[in-house]
Image (tube, rainbow, N blue to C red):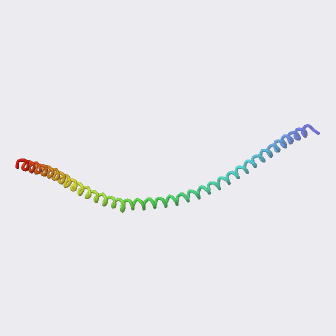
Amino acid sequence: MTEETKLILDKLEIVGSDVRELKIRVGSLETKVDSLETKVDSLETKVDSLETKVDSLDSKVGVLETDMKRMQLTLENEVDRNIKLIAEGHLDLNRKLTEALKYKEEHELLQVRMNLAEADIKRLKDAVFVSA
C-alpha cells in the first residue's frame, strides 16, 4: 500500500467516523422532532378545546347581556314607576297623618279646657252649697 492510499483510507475513516457521528446526531434530532410534533399535536388539541370553551362562553355572555337588558328595561319601565306611585301615596298618607295629629292636639287642648271648666263649676257649686 502506498502512502497515498493510506492517506485516503485515513481520510475515509475520518469521514466514516464523521458520518457515523452525523447519523447519531440526526437520529437524536429525529427523536427531538418527533417529541416536538407530539407536543404540537397536544397543543393543537388544547387550543381546539379552548376555542370550544371560548365559543361557549361567548354564547353565555350573549344570553347574560340579553337578560341584563331585559332586567334594566323592567326596572326602568315597571319597578321605578311603581315605586313612584307608592311614594306619592305615602306623601298623601303623611299629609293626612299631619292633619290628624293637628286635630288630635286641638282635641287634647279642648279636653284640658273642659276639665278646667268642670273643676271650676265644681268649686262654684261647693262654694254655693257651703254659703247656703
Using residue 28 as the reference point, say whether residue 45 is left or right of it: left
Question: Vertical placement of 90 versus 19: above or below?
Answer: below
Question: Vertical placement of 10 versus 122: above or below?
Answer: above
Number of numbered tags placed on the structure image:
0
The residue lying at 78 percent from left, 47 percent from top is 27
Using residue 67 as the reference point, say whether residue 85 is left or right of it: left
The residue lying at 38 percent from left, 59 percent from top is 75
The residue lying at 69 percent from left, 51 percent from top is 39
On-image quarter of the N terminus = top right
Using residue 111 as the reference point, say whether residue 53 is left or right of it: right
The residue lying at 54 percent from left, 57 percent from top is 57
Using residue 115 as the reference point, say whether residue 85 is left or right of it: right
Q: Position of residue 67 (x, y in %)?
A: 45, 61
Judge by depth and name the residue closer to the eye, 59 or 88.
Answer: 88
Residue that lies at the very extreme toward the top in this rendered image? 3
Indicate the quadrant where residue 16 lies.
top right
